[in-house]
Amino acid sequence: MWTFVGAATGLPSILFTAALVVVVCFWLLVAVGATTANTFDSDVDLDAWGFGGVPVSVSLSLVTVFSWSLTVGSTALLVAITSSGAVTAVLRLIAPAAALFMAWQLTRRSVRPLRRLRPDEPGFGGPPA
């Protein structure tokens, strides 16, 4: 348990942990009706990133959750199977970048089925990204 807490609150995972807290607070505000899930849709178009067809808040929330999960998991795994040293330090710095790339890919794949649920969104009906 303490390995997980240390991995979630230690560097570099703390960056994704802070982003996850913001995402959770946003969705709590949506749940109580203080804002809507479409709040950011007029500001950003994420079709180029492969996230088109769903609200921006949904796609960025998925990226945040996936990247946090992958970063914390890889950091906890590194702590459990390696000793401290230069190689471990380099791997702990590479893990968030790799997790962010993998989270982007997972989000692109997760958004595809969600596009069918929102046919009124711009970008719907285009070729899959």
Image (cartoon, helix red, strand yellow):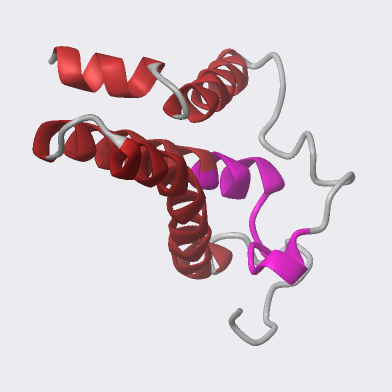
Q: Position of residue 4 (x, y in %)?
A: 22, 22
Residue at the (56%, 15%) spot, across then down: 25
Placement of the C terminus among the 4 image quadrants:
bottom right
* Residue 11 magenta: no
Instruction: Name the residue located 53 percent from the left edge and 59 percent from the top edge.
Output: 104
Q: Which residues are magenta?
A: 46-63
Quarter where residue 31 is shown: top right
| Residue 12 versus residue 92 in the image, above or below | above
Against 88, is 7 above or below? Answer: above
Front residue (pair 41, 4): 4
Where on the picture, by quarter, is residue 123?
bottom right
Q: Residue furthest right?
A: 43
Between 82 and 108, the residue placed more toward the observer is: 82
Residue 69 image offset from top left, x and y in percent = 34, 38
For image coordinates 40% across by 44% down, the residue present is 90
- Asked if 75 appears above or below 1 in the picture, the reply is below
Name the foreground residue: 63 vs 124: 63
Residue 111 appears left or right of 33: left
